[in-house]
Image: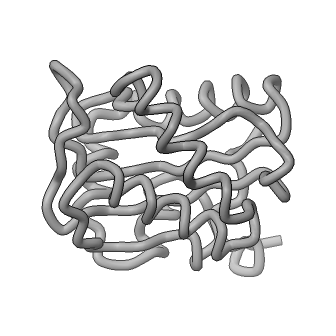
Amino acid sequence: MTLLPLPLDAIEIGVHADTWRAAVTAAGDALQRSGATEAGYTERMIRVIDEFGAYVVIAPGLALAHARPGPDVVTEGLSIVTLAEPVAFGHPHNDPVGVIVGLAVRNGDEHLHVVAQLANVFNDPQVIPAIAAATDAEAIRSLLGMTDSAKEPE
């Protein structure tokens, strides 16, 4: 299984965010801009962190912002936001965060599959710093093992 779609308009580089809420909002805005979610999804991602804490900070420097499937998820999708300056989420070991992955899925099974695929990507300790340092969206897609199907050889 491959990763969910990550269109170029779902990637933002060098975002200025003073708080984790602003960082998650940027990831939610990118999901909405790409057509994966409607506006309410971003607020639900923030409420998840308010309720359950910084468990979304899954590795040093990396947060996986998400909420449960719901009617505000139009289609499955990912977003990636890199921050100009990392922010604290309140995680005891993995703060500060410089890369936020936004995740929207329509069912729980899809959530498990995507998290497993992301774990495979982020098992390489060089990927998170490389994404944080990337200067263009195509570089981020490449680091995630995504290629433009129009550019793939036949």
| Residue at 47%, 39% in the rendered image | 64
Q: Which quarter of the image is occupied by the C terminus?
A: bottom right
| Residue at 54%, 59% in the rendered image | 28
Q: Which quarter of the image is occupied by the N terminus?
A: top right
- Does residue 90 sit above or below 23 in this rendering? above
- Does residue 60 sit above or below 38 in this rendering? above
Percent from the top left, x then y, of residue 72? 79, 53
Percent from the top left, x then y, of residue 11? 49, 70
Percent from the top left, x then y, of residue 134? 29, 68
- Does residue 55 sit above or below 122 in this rendering? above
Q: Residue 58 lies in what quarter of the image?
A: top left
Q: Is residue 120 left or right of residue 58?
A: right
Q: Residue 140 lies in what quarter of the image?
A: bottom left
Q: Is residue 7 left or right of residue 73?
A: left
> What is the number of callouts on the image?
0
Q: Is residue 57 left or right of residue 91?
A: right
| Residue at 27%, 55% in the rendered image | 130
Percent from the top left, x then y, of residue 150? 76, 80
Render colour scheme: one colour
- For the residue pair 118 and 66, the one nearer the viewer reads as 66
- Does residue 25 sit above or below 88 in this rendering? below
| Residue at 25%, 63% in the rendered image | 83
Q: Is residue 42 left or right of residue 58?
A: right
